[in-house]
Amino acid sequence: MILASASKVRARLLEGARVPFTIHPADVNEDRIKQAQKGENTDTIALRLAEAKARAIAKEHADKMIIGADQILACDGRLFDKPKDRAEAEGHLRTLRGRTHRLITACAVVHGEDLLWQSCAEARLTMRDFSDAFIGSYLDDVGDDALASVGAYRLEDMGAQLFSKIEGDYFTILGLPLLPLLDFLRARGVLRQ
């Protein structure tokens, strides 16, 4: 199996669950895919992105099962991308503070040209109303880690301090619907029953 993602968190989740895999990050034009899906719901966009990543790697490795995944953050009708720099991370956090946002996480498994499985899950997270000073100290502490996720946070680390309420599966928040994926892999005989 191949994970078509550069996400260290997704790799850690699969390693922790003892799923055998290698990593080959997919290079897809996410903006083009999002534009092509404009007007679709967030689940459809996330599923298309996950599938596109898996298919991009499947072209080179038709003999392997490829796992593609993607995550979208939506708040009040706006979709967020990973921040490009600290200023953009600050902007994300200012916009999200005191509000509830949705994380939509999709996963697709492709073998050759066949889409074998896909899943989409959602979590709802409410950020507390923190100060600008807290944003600054938070970003000082986490550094470039803030640029690795769509919300400028990693819940498994100091990012937990940003929240007052969380509804949804922990693995979905981390970027992979792990439990449904493990069920699929057991059904396919990749993992023991």
Image (cartoon, rainbow, N blue to C red):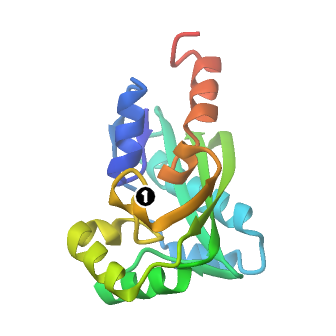
Instruction: Please tell me which residue lies in front, 131 or 108.
Output: 131
Q: Position of residue 82 (x, y in %)?
A: 43, 74
Q: Position of residue 29 (x, y in %)?
A: 48, 73
Instruction: Classify residue 45 by image quadrant.
Output: bottom right
Q: Which residue is mark 1?
A: 160
The residue shown at (26%, 77%) is: 137
Looking at the image, residue 95 lies above or below residue 11: below
Q: Position of residue 145 (x, y in %)?
A: 28, 65
Work out which residue is located at the far top of the displayed protein and give it: 193
What kind of element bears circle 1?
A: helix
Instruction: Please tell me which residue lies in front, 23 or 96.
Output: 96
Looking at the image, residue 193 lies above or below residue 183: above
Q: Is residue 84 visible?
A: no
Looking at the image, residue 30 lies above or below residue 5: below
Q: Position of residue 31 (x, y in %)?
A: 53, 79
The residue shown at (72%, 80%) is: 38
- Residue 120 placement, left or right of 163: right
Looking at the image, residue 36 lies above or below residue 53: below
Instruction: Classify residue 79 by image quadrant.
Output: bottom right
Q: Amino acid at mark 1?
A: Ala
